[in-house]
Image: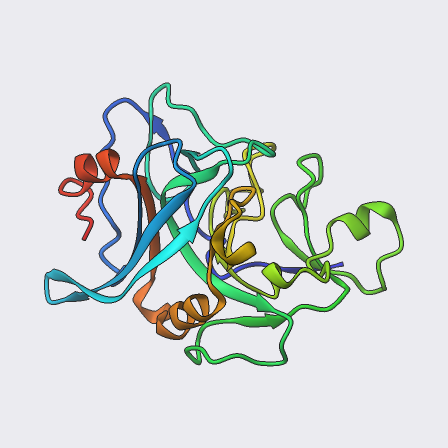
Amino acid sequence: MNFLLPLATAVMLAVTTSAPAFELPAASQQCLVGITDGWDSTSATLRLYQKSGTSWKPVAGPWKTRLGKMGLAWGIGLHPVPKGAATKREGDWKSPAGVFSIGGVWGYQPAIQKHPKLPYVRITPRHLWVEDPESPSYNRGIVLDHDPASAWEKKQQMRQNDPAHALKLFIAHNAPNRRGGAIPYAGSSIFFHIWRGGGTKPTAGCTAMPENDLRSLIVRLDPTLRPVYVLLPKAEYDKHRKPWKLP
């Protein structure tokens, strides 16, 4: 097997702390902000900001999105997790909240419009994304050297003839890092992807949006600006905006 490590797999895992000292990385000059009404919300409004000098300026959006069927829970990303807070778990149908690196696109088409330095992988039947928490490859992309044969391999296939997953942008929740693999059972396979039913259906934890909006977002992302995704309920965003230096 060969491993496809996403662009953002070098992200440092968050540390649970009662007095977090955190701010957006200085190198991050693009910030995608998703705001919900509360922790139980299944939709968010998304805007893309870019640094101009020392100030954040809106450059795209607003876009409507759908989130996990059960709302949000703190995820594992760049941010600290508040002490005692509920965190995302595999299969909980919640979208991870916090601050995450983003990057790396997967899709069914031979090529898409994007920044030249943004990685794109055309999905074939041999491309897997491992959602099995017991696997050492948990939350990693794998390319098989053979057509999927076992039930396990078929279950992990990225290509499921599902139009909603014909285009996917990686969100680095619980991503493997230089110190080891993803944390078992902490959640996997979190992406931006195309929404279902014209936005009438929530997701299992991803952020879903209209295909044209997703393509528009991907075109605007510049990996050299180290883009990040901030997803928070409005009250949490207002609380952390200044200390975390959010837009």
Identified at 50% across, 58% down, the residue is: 198
Q: Is residue 17 placed above or below 67 in the rendered structure? A: above
Q: Is residue 31 visible in this depiction of the protein?
A: no
Q: Is residue 52 placed above or below 16 in the rendered structure? A: below
- Looking at this view, is 36 or 81 the one in front? 36
16 sits left or right of 95 in the view: left
Q: Residue 74, how many percent across, how many down?
A: 40, 33
Q: How is the image coloured?
A: rainbow
Q: Residue 4, how many percent across, how many down?
A: 62, 61
Q: Residue furthest right?
A: 149
152 sits left or right of 49 in the view: right
Identified at 23% across, 25% down, the residue is: 19
- Looking at this view, is 57 or 121 the one in front? 57
Q: Residue furthest top?
A: 84
In terms of image quadrants, where is residue 108? bottom right
Q: Residue 85, how many percent across, how many down?
A: 37, 23
- Looking at this view, is 8 or 86 the one in front? 86
Identified at 73% across, 58% down, the residue is: 160
In terms of image quadrants, where is residue 138? top right
Figure disc tally: 0
Q: Residue 24, how many percent across, how many down?
A: 25, 49
Q: Is residue 123 visible in this depiction of the protein?
A: yes
Identified at 77% across, 65% down, the residue is: 125
Q: For the N terminus, give its image quadrant.
A: bottom right
- Looking at this view, is 68 or 109 the one in front? 68
